[in-house]
Image (spheres, rainbow, N blue to C red):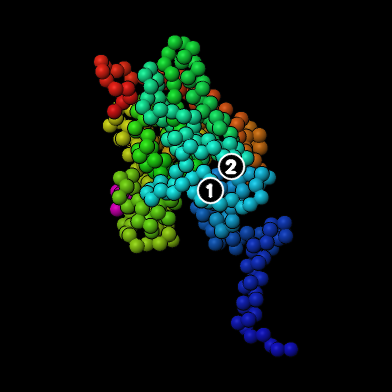
Amino acid sequence: MARCSSQTVQIVATAAILAWGLAPGRLALGTPGRLRETLRNDQLSQADYEKMERGYYEQILDAGRKLGASDAVEPESPRHNRSQAKSVPFEGGPLAQGVDDLREFVLKPNLSVDHAGARWTTNALGMRDRPYESTKPPNTLRIAFVGDSIGAGWGVGDGQAFEAVLERQLDGRSKAGGGSAVEILNFAIPGHGPGQRWEHFKRVGWATEPDLVLFESTQADSGWDERRLRGLLPRGIGWDSPMYRDVLTRAHARPGGTIESYKQVLRPYREEFAAGVFRTAAADCRARGVPIVLVMVPRVGKTADQAEIQRLIALARDAGFTAIVDLSDTYNGIDPKSLAVGPNDYHPNAKGHAMLAQRLDAALQTQTNLLRPPKLGPGEKGGRQ
């Protein structure tokens, strides 16, 4: 028998260790299993694991990933029992179209399709919402909603997202009392980080003449823009954005880098990127005399990290947001299985959205000054300019 060289033995041993390390937990129990986890932990920092978890829940670019799954694993379908094929990135699916700017992708307008077990309908303005006129009608309070996949109602049917439920509640109550109509225009895009949400709204939202802006956020937002910029900067996108420009300068980031090099440079500034987005959003609204409210929503199956939530709230308050509505405890004490879209998708189901709408409605009733249409002078155009 031919004698194996030491190099061959080393290669075989390494391959065996790698295969063992990738084995499912049920096949690697006891002390070897603990050693295997130690090896994995050496390769991935806690920050990396937080990125994975956030990446599943918030970022539909990696739609359907199980909570805590590795970035190297092919994402599963968001509703695995309703789809045979593996999911594709959101921007490559039937709901989105690419754009050559910071947003990367937006929803297709005038769409009506079944996707991931839910009906998705978009209007002519490219919103997952009912039809609206671009010009605000008379005697109408128009609210702009800026958000991500939760705000867009990922996994639930048309009209079941908490934005739509809230609109019906506010509009019905106002009209019953002889008040104005209330519209909430949903500018949420699945997979968009905070800066992308605001960039999208700036491009398409101000033309609709909103009287109030609701900016939806979760605790994952503290590092979301930093993670998105890792992939955008190598493509030459994001350098000139007023939301990021000052932080990129302080980080000594330079064009020509890679995703990995920008990860090392940008990570220490993760919260500063979020702060830059909040400052820009607040300043833009202040310049138009439009109040802006931060709406902090929970994530199903994930206990809220109050320290991180309070840091985000402090960033918004320091930026000059008009008000803060913290809904992060809405799901506390409730079985996540009764609130999730499905076993592999931790977005809220219709029940979860209804709970958010009820809580947000109650909070807004205590801020009655925010729910009054602006008084107009003779011949003045509707909406704040």
Q: At 35% from the left edge and 39% from the top edge, which residue is drawn?
A: 203
Q: In the picture shown, does residue 377 fall above or below 58?
A: above
Would you say residue 40 sits in the magenta stretch? no
Q: Amino acid at mark 2?
A: His
Q: At 53% from the left edge and 26% from the top edge, which residue is drawn?
A: 165
| Residue that carries the numbered disc 1 in the rendered image | 93
Other residues around mark 2 within 10 Å, as few (<14) / some (14–19) / many (≥20):
some
Q: At 52% from the left edge and 56% from the top edge, which residue is drawn?
A: 45
Dot label at residue 115: 2
Residue 383 position in % (x across, y down)? 33, 24
Predominant SS along the magenta part = helix
11 left or right, relative to 279: right
Other residues around mark 1 within 10 Å, as few (<14) / some (14–19) / many (≥20):
few
Residue 143 position in % (x across, y down)? 41, 27
User: In terms of sequence position, does the residue under pointer 1 or pointer 2 come before the other?
Assistant: 1
**SS at circle 1:** loop
* Range of magenta residues: 245-249
Instruction: Evaluate whether residue 220 shows in this view.
Output: no
230 left or right, relative to 168: left
CB under 8 Å between discs 1 and 2 = yes
Mark 1 to mark 2 CA distance (whole Å): 9 Å
Q: At 45% from the left edge and 37% from the top edge, which residue is drawn?
A: 126
Instruction: Evaluate whether residue 84 shows in this view.
Output: yes
Residue 150 position in % (x across, y down)? 52, 37
Q: Amino acid at mark 1?
A: Gly
Would you say residue 247 sits in the magenta stretch? yes
Quarter that holds the C terminus = top left
Residue 367, quarter of the rendered image: top left
Q: In the picture shown, does residue 261 fall above or below 126?
A: below
Residue 17, quarter of the rendered image: bottom right
